[in-house]
Image (tube, coloured by chain):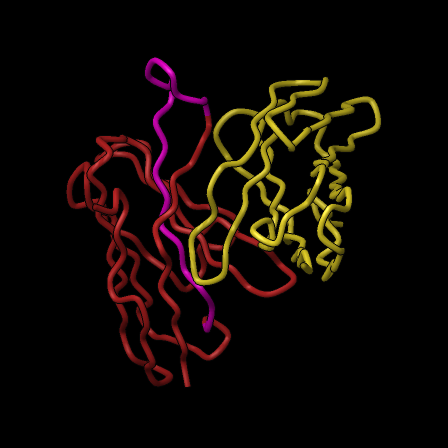
Chain colours: A yellow, B red
C-alpha cells in the first residue's frame, strides 16, 4: 500500500463547476500538508499549505485536512480553464516529502 | 530569471551509457532534492541534500548517485542507464526553517529534464 493515495483521474469539468480533489494517507506522523499545481511541461508549484488539521482558504481554493480520517481535500470554486493542470497532494512529518500520483484536471470553456 | 535551472532539458541516450543531469539554484537555499516523475506514480524522491556535506538516499536511490559540488549545485548521475529509468526528472530546493514570509517545507522545482533511455 502506498503511503499517499490519490486518484490520477483524469477529471474533466465545465467552466464554473466546483472541483473536489482528494488524497488519503497511512502515516499518522504526517503533519504538514500541501497541494502543488503542475502545468504541462513545467515543474510543480505550491498552491496551498496547511499545518495539522483544519481548513485554509485562499481565493477560490480551499484546503481541508482531517487527520482523524487521514484524508485531505482541495476544493476549487468557480473553476476556470486556467485551472487546467495536474494537482499533486504532498505531505511530510518534517523533511521527507511524500507526493500523491497527481490528478489531471481539465476545465472546459 | 529562473531560480532553479536544470540541464539538459531533454536527453535521449542508450542503455549502458553514463548520464549526468545538473541542477543550479540562485535562491540561496541549503536543501536540494532530486525526484523522478512517472505517470500514475507521481513524484518519488531519489536523493536529497541538506547542505554540501550532507547527502541522503531517498525512496528510490538504486541505480543513481549524486554530487553536491556547492550550495548552489546538485548533480544526479546514472552510472549505467537502463530503459526503466526513462522518466521526467526534477530538481527542487527548500529553505527550512523558512525565512520571514516563507512557508516551511515549501519546495521550489526546476523545469524538469525529460530523459529517454533506449
Residue B115 sits above or below residue B35 on the image: below
Residue at the extreme left of the image, as rendered:
B70
State which quadrant residue B50 falls in: top left
Residue B46 sits above or below residue B32 on the image: below
Residue found 58% across the figure and 54% down from its top: A85
Give A17 or B77, whichever is nearer the viewer. Answer: A17
State which quadrant residue B53 falls in: top left
Say if the magenta span includes residue B32.
no
Say if the magenta span includes residue B98.
yes
Residue found 67% across the figure and 54% down from its top: A103
Percent from the top left, x then y, of residue B115? Answer: 38, 72
Quadrant of the rendering where the C terminus of chain A is positioned: bottom right
Mark count: 0
Give B109 or A78, whichever is nearer the viewer. Answer: A78
In the picture provided, is A83 more to the left or to the right than B60?
Answer: right
Give A13 or B12, whichever is nearer the viewer. Answer: A13
Residue found 27% across the figure and 70% down from its top: B19
Residue at the extreme right of the image, as rendered:
A69
In the picture provided, is B110 more to the left or to the right than A55?
Answer: left
Percent from the top left, x then y, of residue B11? Answer: 31, 75
Residue B98 sits above or below residue A41 on the image: above
State which quadrant residue A68 falls in: top right
In the image, which residues are magenta?
B86-104
Percent from the top left, x then y, of residue B68? Answer: 22, 45
Residue found 41% across the figure and 86% down from its top: B118
Percent from the top left, x then y, of residue B51? Answer: 26, 32
Amino acid at each position: 500500500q502506498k503511503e499517499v493515495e490519490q486518484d490520477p483521474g483524469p477529471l474533466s469539468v465545465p467552466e464554473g463547476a466546483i472541483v473536489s480533489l482528494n488524497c488519503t494517507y497511512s502515516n499518522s506522523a504526517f503533519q504538514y500538508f500541501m497541494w502543488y499545481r503542475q502545468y504541462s511541461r513545467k515543474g510543480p508549484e505550491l498552491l496551498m499549505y496547511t499545518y495539522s488539521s483544519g481548513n485554509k482558504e485562499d481565493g477560490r481554493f480551499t484546503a481541508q485536512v482531517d487527520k482523524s480520517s487521514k484524508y485531505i481535500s482541495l476544493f476549487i470554486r468557480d473553476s476556470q480553464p486556467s485551472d487546467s493542470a495536474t494537482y499533486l497532494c504532498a505531505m511530510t512529518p518534517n523533511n521527507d516529502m511524500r507526493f500523491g500520483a497527481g490528478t489531471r484536471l481539465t476545465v472546459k470553456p | 530569471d529562473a531560480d532553479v535551472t536544470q540541464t539538459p532539458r531533454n536527453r535521449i541516450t542508450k542503455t549502458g551509457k553514463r548520464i549526468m543531469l545538473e541542477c543550479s539554484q540562485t535562491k540561496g537555499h541549503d536543501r536540494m532534492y532530486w525526484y523522478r516523475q512517472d505517470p500514475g506514480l507521481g513524484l518519488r524522491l531519489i536523493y536529497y541534500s541538506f547542505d554540501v556535506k550532507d547527502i541522503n538516499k531517498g525512496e528510490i536511490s538504486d541505480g543513481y548517485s549524486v554530487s553536491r559540488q556547492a550550495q548552489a549545485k546538485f548533480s544526479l548521475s546514472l552510472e549505467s542507464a537502463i530503459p526503466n529509468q526513462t522518466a521526467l526528472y526534477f530538481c527542487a530546493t527548500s529553505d527550512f526553517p523558512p525565512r520571514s514570509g516563507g512557508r516551511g517545507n515549501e519546495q521550489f522545482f526546476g523545469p524538469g529534464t525529460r530523459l529517454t533511455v533506449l
